[in-house]
Image (spheres, rainbow, N blue to C red):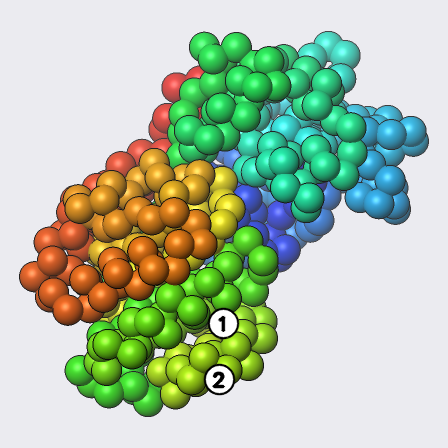
Amino acid sequence: MKIALVCQTFLPCIGGAEFVMHHLGQQWCRQGHDVRIINGRSNEVTQPGATYSVRKFTLLRGSTRFGYHRFPFLGRGIRSVKRLLDEYEPDFTSVHFGYPTGVWLAKMKPVPKYVVTCHGEELTKFGWGYRSRYPIDDILSEALCSSVGAIAISTHARDLMVELGVPPDNIPYIPNGVDLEKFSVEPDFDLRAKFNLPKDAVVILSVGRHHPQKAYDSGLRAFAKVAAKAPEAHYVILGRDTSAQQPLAEQLGIGARVTFCNGLYGDELIGAYKQANIFFSPSIWEMMSLVVLEAIAAGLPEVVTNISGSQDVIQSGDNGFVVEPGDEDAMAEKLLELVGDKDLRERLGASNLAKSKYYGWDHISRKYLELA
């Protein structure tokens, strides 16, 4: 089968949607399909070992600033993508982001058969989302309703689609996935040696870029309460520009107990997950956090907030604990419970390892093809 993945962005631009498309493409190639990623960023395969092909379409400058749905940007997007789809003639088209890519597909004549996956920026009501920046509810609803499946990666995403008028029967739930193969080996990496941590340190790990939605300020204040009672606890935060939080850590008196790293990649990142003791996500908003799924694959017990995605995959007392966003006392309480109880950490972590098989990309990619 010939499969097209269509999105306005792709690697080497780094984000959750880009990696979702990469992994879907790779899995479908492994399953014997011919896969092409049609995107607005790159005309070259940038990931080592990737076996899909890549084609770039052109966008007019100013699309993001003025709106992909406005003249003349809408017409250019439709024509550019349609030309590449007509050239490739896919049997199955997987569109990523309801806006703008889904809008372009819905307005093609004739409308092709496609599924569309919403990753969050087009659905959220927060100020950084497209719905706040542009009046797109009507055309977004049209794009989702015109698809043969508007894929929700979380129950919250499903609820937002229903609010937009998408029939519930047209909203399959397919979460994001994780590369289980990478987590099945022990990398040649020593987390504690890398950051000069005591060998007996109980390491709490957070992964993600510096952004208001990650709420690292709240996480640091919660950890300050932990550090006051558990001298063995140490907090490691990995992600682009996270060192911007260093002044707050110093202000809270925990500068020596918190390590910021602006990025670990490949085997080092996998090693960090596998050698930490607890995963902590204080985020106030996600649609379906890839790092929460990666921590599941690493067999880490988790403390997460009661937000989209996390609330679907973590059940308090089973594979971690779920607390309300911004509730620093509750965060600290559950972190302290895990820091002080190795048996509890091992039990919850083992539960996550057992659940991880449901989030492997091979399993997730086949659920997509059920819609073909």
324 lies above or below 209: above
- Is 322 situated above or below 74? below
Report the amino acid beneath label 2: Glu
Q: Is residue 351 above or below residue 142?
A: below
Residue reaching furthest left? 343
Q: Which mark is residue 250?
A: 2
Q: Residue furthest right?
A: 72
Image point (24%, 41%), residue name:
315
Callout 2 secondary element: helix
Is 193 placed left or right of 216 in the picture?
left
Q: Quadrant of residue 369?
A: top left
Report the side of 293 relative to 357 (left or right).
Answer: right
Query: Above or below — where is 175 with respect to 19?
Result: above
Q: In the visual, does 197 lie left or right of 29?
A: left
Amino acid type of disc 1?
A: Gly
Element assignment for label 1: loop
Residue sitting nearer the eye, 52 or 324: 324
- Residue located at (65% from left, 18% from top): 141
Residue drawn at point x = 23 percent, y = 50 percent: 320
**Residue 32 visible in the displayed image:** no
The crowding category of the residue bearing disc 2, from other C-alpha atoms within 10 Å (few below 14, some 14 to 19, many at least 20), is: few
Which sits in the foreground, 279 or 354? 279
Q: Position of residue 50 (x, y in %)?
A: 49, 51
Q: Which mark is residue 331?
A: none
Q: Position of residue 215 (x, y in %)?
A: 50, 59
Label 2 to label 1, Cα distance in Å?
Answer: 21 Å
The reply to whether residue 336 is in sight is: yes
Q: Label 1: which residue?
A: 263
Left/right of residue 340 with respect to residue 158 in the rendered view: left
